[in-house]
Image (tube, grey):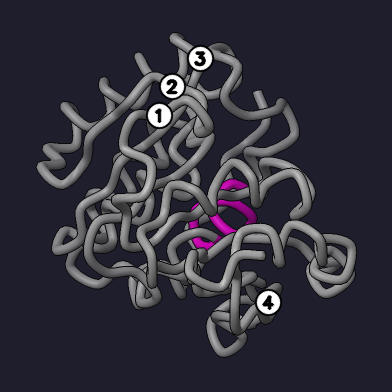
């Protein structure tokens, strides 16, 4: 079995007094993630840096009631819920084995700020109610926006974790950006002072009155 990456020194700074909960979640994901189809076989040597901290470093961007579309193993939704117990999270995931895992972790970690919903993003009945919608590693932005933007309230925000190609994805999604009334669409880099590879997010405001 491949060894789990040693906990980076930045982890304690990022999670603060929640580091114990983060460690418990990371250990569970390392122990069971591959066998349950949540992470690939090559992810353990970079689990902390590539997945846990990559998600957690964005925690200051969230407030109110947040939806995570395609939550999967809980990246970023469970990680954010651990880091921000003051924020309410709705984890939206269509696959039963993954929602089972998410519910197990919510119980095991004692999280009281998480609701797990088995649904596709486009089918969820709470569309238009969330303050912020997030997703990580789901699909290209032009495909992701129709799944996420409708879930945010008018005036709400999208905070989507993306890769190095985020700027080009914005250009390719021009039609969807206009269709869903998105404004102030930009790429922000988070955690450059904490992580060797900082996290890139696409942020945007949802203004339905500006739809065309």
At label 2, counting other C-alpha atoms closer than 10 Å, the crowd grade (few under 14, some 14-19, many 20 or more) is some
* Farthest-out residue, bottom: 193
Q: Nearer the viewer, mark 2 or mark 3?
A: 2
Q: In the image shown, does 181 or 205 lie closer to the viewer?
A: 181
Q: Which mark is residue 196?
A: 4
* Picture layout, residue 31 above or below residue 169: above
* 144 sits left or right of 151 in the view: right
Cα gap from disc 1 to disc 3, whole angstroms: 14 Å
Q: Residue visible at 76% across and 62% down?
A: 163
Q: Residue visible at 22% across and 64% down?
A: 64
Q: Earlier in the sequence, mark 4 or mark 2?
A: 2
Q: Which mark is residue 119?
A: 2
Q: Earlier in the sequence, mark 1 or mark 2?
A: 2
Contact between marks 1 and 3 (CB within 8 A): the answer is: no
On the image, numbered disc 1 is attached to which residue? 124
Q: Residue visible at 62% across and 37% down?
A: 3
Cα gap from disc 2 to disc 3, whole angstroms: 8 Å
Q: Residue visible at 32% across and 25% down?
A: 117
Q: Which quadrant would the C terminus be assigned to in this image?
A: bottom right
Contact between marks 3 and 4 (CB within 8 A): the answer is: no
On the image, numbered disc 3 is attached to which residue? 95
Residue 93, percent across and down? 46, 26
Q: Earlier in the sequence, mark 2 or mark 3?
A: 3
Q: In the image shown, does 42 or 208 lie closer to the viewer?
A: 208
Label 2, secondary structure: give it. loop
Highlighted range, magenta: 47-54
* Secondary structure predominantly adopted by residues drawn in magenta: helix
Cα gap from disc 4 to disc 2, whole angstroms: 35 Å
Q: Earlier in the sequence, mark 3 or mark 4?
A: 3
Q: Nearer the viewer, mark 4 or mark 2?
A: 2
At label 4, counting other C-alpha atoms closer than 10 Å, the crowd grade (few under 14, some 14-19, many 20 or more) is few
Q: Which quadrant would the N terminus be assigned to in this image?
A: top right
């Amino acid at each position: 079995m491949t060894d789990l990456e040693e906990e980076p020194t930045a982890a304690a700074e990022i999670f603060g007094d929640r580091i114990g909960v983060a460690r418990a979640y990371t250990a569970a994901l390392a122990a069971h993630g591959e066998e349950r189809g949540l992470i690939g076989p090559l992810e353990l040597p970079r689990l902390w840096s590539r997945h846990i901290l990559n998600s957690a470093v964005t925690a200051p961007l969230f407030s109110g009631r947040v939806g995570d579309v395609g939550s999967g193993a809980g990246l970023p939704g469970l990680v954010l819920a651990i880091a921000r117990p003051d924020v309410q999270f709705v984890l939206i995931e269509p696959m039963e084995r993954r929602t089972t895992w998410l519910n197990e972790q919510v119980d095991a970690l004692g999280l009281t700020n998480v609701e797990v919903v088995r649904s596709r993003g486009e089918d969820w009945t709470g569309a238009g109610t969330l303050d912020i919608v997030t997703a990580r590693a789901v699909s290209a932005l032009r495909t992701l926006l129709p799944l996420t933007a409708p879930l945010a309230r008018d005036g709400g925000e999208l905070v989507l974790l993306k890769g190095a190609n985020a700027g080009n994805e914005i250009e390719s999604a021009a039609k969807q950006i206009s269709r869903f009334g998105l404004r102030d669409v930009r790429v922000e880099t988070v955690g450059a002072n904490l992580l060797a590879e900082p996290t890139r997010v696409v942020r945007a405001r949802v203004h339905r009155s500006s739809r065309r």
